[in-house]
Image (spheres, grey):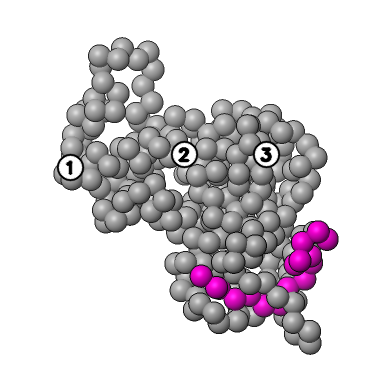
Amino acid sequence: MFQEKMVTPAIPERVYTLCKIVEKKPISNSELKEKLEPDYLNNASSYYADYRNAAEELKLISISDNMISLNVDTSVIKTTEHMRKYINSIICEFHNGQFYQVTRAYFDLDSNILKGEKNVANLAPLMSQKTNRPVDAMAMRAWRFWISYLGMGYLQDMFIIPNADTFIKDIIEFTGFEKNRRYSFGEFMGRILPYSKIIINSDPNNRSINYGVSNALRSLHDAGYIKLEHILDQDDIWNLYPLKAHTVSGTVTNITICK
């Protein structure tokens, strides 16, 4: 799912349920499969291997001698929100995977994504072109579940609205910013960038924030979680995607974490 091709059966809910089953004690592969896909249901297709592999890729579980064990502290899977925060902290480790590459290409499209196809499955040819690797409609259907779950966009029917507010909030929380301290925007970007290159251009000379990340920062500002400012006579000036209707319409120099 994250190392290679995206697959639709490996949805977040199945990965989470699998982890909760092995939370208390190790379990054999066959017993775990039976708990998740009982034989009496007579399912024609088995999806178990797909979401088990996703959990293993994410280092949530380990497999040894056909026994499956939880590979993280139980606090990581306390809730689906806790699991999301954990995954967001490691997602950049999969920079060679299809999920990472497609997400990066999607955010690089800026607001142009609003002008085109509104069914993500039909974006497969464009994503193939942008990533220079095969991407099919099934992979894009799988992508939409995870992009929404990880807080990088909002799912509306079959369209993802680029707004990474939840993802950026998660990154802010585990990078240890002091609350109510004013940071230069450059320092802020430097601290979150190692974890957020999946959605942010990593070119240090590029001081322009793309559409999806600009939406995220404005959403967090409106929610009172952060405060964005443009302070006169500051040299560290960054450009948000322009939005005249917003109080923070263009440039920013400083950010404060308020909550």
User: Is 117 or 177 nearer to us in this picture?
Assistant: 177
C-alpha separation, residue under disc 2 versus residue under disc 1: 23 Å
Residue 66's place in the image compared with 34, above or below, is below
Q: Amino acid at mark 2?
A: Met
Decide which of 229, 99 is in the foreground and name it: 229
The disc placed on residue 201 is none
User: Considering only order in the chain, which callout, 2 or 3, is on the residue closer to the N terminus?
Assistant: 2
Q: Main secondary structure of the magenta part?
A: loop
Can residue 72 be seen? no
- Name the kind of residue labelled 1 in the image: Pro
The stretch drawn in magenta includes residue 253: yes
Which residue occupies 64% across, 58% down?
219
Does residue 93 sit above or below 161 in this rendering?
below
Q: Amino acid at mark 3?
A: Met
Outermost residue to the right: 244
Q: Which residues are magenta?
A: 244-259
The answer to whether 26 appears left or right of 215 in the picture is: left
x, y (%) of residue 68? 23, 40
Q: Residue at the location (60% across, 54% down)?
A: 164
Tell me where residue 121 appears, x and y as whole percent: 64, 30
| Disc 3 from disc 2: Cα separation | 16 Å
Per the image, the residue denoted by label 3 is: 127
Q: Position of residue 137 (x, y in %)?
A: 61, 28
**For mark 1, what is the residue?**
26
Residue 229 quadrant? bottom right
Please name the residue that numbered disc 2 is placed on.
Answer: 1
Above-or-below relation of 60 to 200: above
Q: Is residue 11 left or right of residue 241?
A: left
Badge 3 marks a residue whose secondary structure is helix
